[in-house]
Image (cartoon, rainbow, N blue to C red):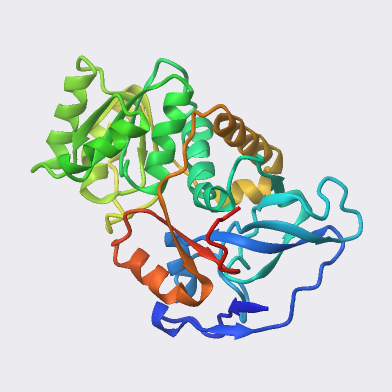
């Protein structure tokens, strides 16, 4: 089979396609023909060797591949050959075939194309755990979603609306307001304004009668975090998803004490490993809401596996206006 094989960590430009032996299914495992795998920011870190969790080399990168079950190992009963599945495999997706634990395979709805399943993977489960598990969201509350036009941000906007929250979207320019409004946001704030420390709070307070946001989801960090934490309501909850803005912020804890606020983080891969029951519930909710028409996958741009360098370069250069999805078998239908 064809696969991207990482023998040494390095820049995207060093990635190569190799012919390697097909994986051999073991007890408790499933072998899938990979139909679609999303390119995610974390893949850039894994390829470069800078991520906190790195597989032993050589390995095939690519998280959460989707595909068709071609073989099952001893003891596997809840999925069968021919099933269309999303897997929670932490690696192996940048290949034509991949292994996953059977317990980490979820049958996807019949009306969900593989490309959409792949594009929603990682983004929607991250957003769900940030909002529902760490943020403890309740209908009627107000959530401020920062980086709202990113994959996780758009997922969070849709999920929050589906669960009955008021959604304020943080966008990097007014030109992006239409995208978050189309995703369901009730209002938006401009993160390109000067003096973010004050301007974020001022904008949020203007939209909440001075109360602030009950929940803030932050995948950005940097100066935006500094302003957003001040936009929290009394007893508000801030969930740290990442630091796409570059700087890892710090927080004076007296502010946490005075406003009775909580600041927590989300590392979704830990939930996959430690609480598979919660992950199963998360996936069931995402598929349910999709089937009910309350979740819509973000626009996608597909690439054949041979164009992996081009796909990751676009991701690295932040030139992607859509979710980037690799098609190892080159099937443009994505079904």
As drawn, 73 above or below 234? below
Residue 327 seen in this snapshot: yes
Q: Locate residue 125 relative to residue 165 in the image: left or right.
A: right
Between 173 and 294, the one nearer to me in the picture: 294
Residue drawn at x 61%, y 30% is 288
> Which image quadrant is residue 4 in?
bottom right
As drawn, 189 above or below 274? above
> Which image quadrant is residue 196 in?
top left
As drawn, 113 above or below 160? below
Percent of width and height locating residue 93: 60, 65
Percent of width and height locating residue 80: 83, 51
Percent of width and height locating residue 267: 51, 49
Between 214 and 81, the one nearer to me in the picture: 81
Between 317 and 322, the one nearer to me in the picture: 322
Percent of width and height locating residue 172: 21, 45
Q: Quadrant of the N terminus?
A: bottom right
> Which image quadrant is residue 166 in?
top left
Residue 241 seen in this snapshot: no
Q: Locate residue 275 relative to residue 295 in the image: left or right.
A: right
Between 178 and 28, the one nearer to me in the picture: 178
Residue drawn at x 42%, y 61% is 41
Residue drawn at x 69%, y 69% is 97
Q: Locate residue 217 relative to residue 108 in the image: left or right.
A: left
């Amino acid at each position: 089979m064809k696969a991207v094989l990482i023998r040494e960590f390095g820049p995207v430009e060093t990635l190569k396609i190799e012919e390697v032996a097909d994986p051999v299914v073991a007890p408790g495992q499933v072998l899938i023909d990979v139909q679609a795998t999303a390119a995610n920011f974390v893949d850039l870190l894994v390829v470069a060797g800078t991520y906190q969790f790195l597989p032993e080399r050589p390995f095939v990168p690519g998280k959460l591949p989707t595909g068709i079950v071609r073989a099952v190992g001893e003891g596997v009963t809840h999925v069968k050959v021919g099933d269309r599945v999303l897997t929670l495999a932490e690696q192996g997706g940048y290949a034509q075939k991949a292994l996953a634990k059977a317990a980490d395979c979820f049958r996807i709805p019949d009306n969900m194309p593989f490309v959409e399943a792949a594009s929603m993977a990682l983004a929607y489960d991250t957003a769900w755990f940030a909002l529902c598990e760490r943020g403890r969201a309740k209908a009627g509350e107000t959530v401020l979603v920062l980086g709202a036009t990113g994959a996780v941000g758009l997922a969070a906007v849709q999920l929050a609306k589906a669960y009955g929250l008021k959604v304020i979207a943080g966008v990097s320019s007014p030109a992006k307001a239409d995208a978050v409004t189309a995703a369901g946001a009730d209002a938006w704030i401009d993160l390109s304004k000067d003096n973010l420390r004050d301007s974020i709070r001022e904008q949020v307070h203007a939209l909440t009668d001075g109360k602030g946001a009950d929940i803030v989801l932050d995948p950005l960090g940097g100066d935006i975090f500094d302003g957003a934490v001040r936009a929290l309501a009394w007893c508000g909850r801030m969930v740290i998803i990442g630091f796409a803005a570059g700087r890892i912020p710090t927080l004076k804890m007296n502010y946490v004490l005075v406003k009775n606020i909580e600041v927590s983080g989300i590392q979704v891969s830990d939930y996959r490993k430690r609480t598979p029951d919660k992950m199963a519930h998360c996936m069931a909710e995402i598929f349910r809401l999709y089937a009910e028409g309350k979740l819509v996958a973000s626009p996608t741009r597909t690439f054949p596996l041979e164009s992996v360098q081009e796909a990751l370069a676009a991701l690295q250069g932040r030139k992607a206006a859509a979710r980037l999805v690799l098609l190892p078998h080159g099937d443009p239908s994505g079904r």
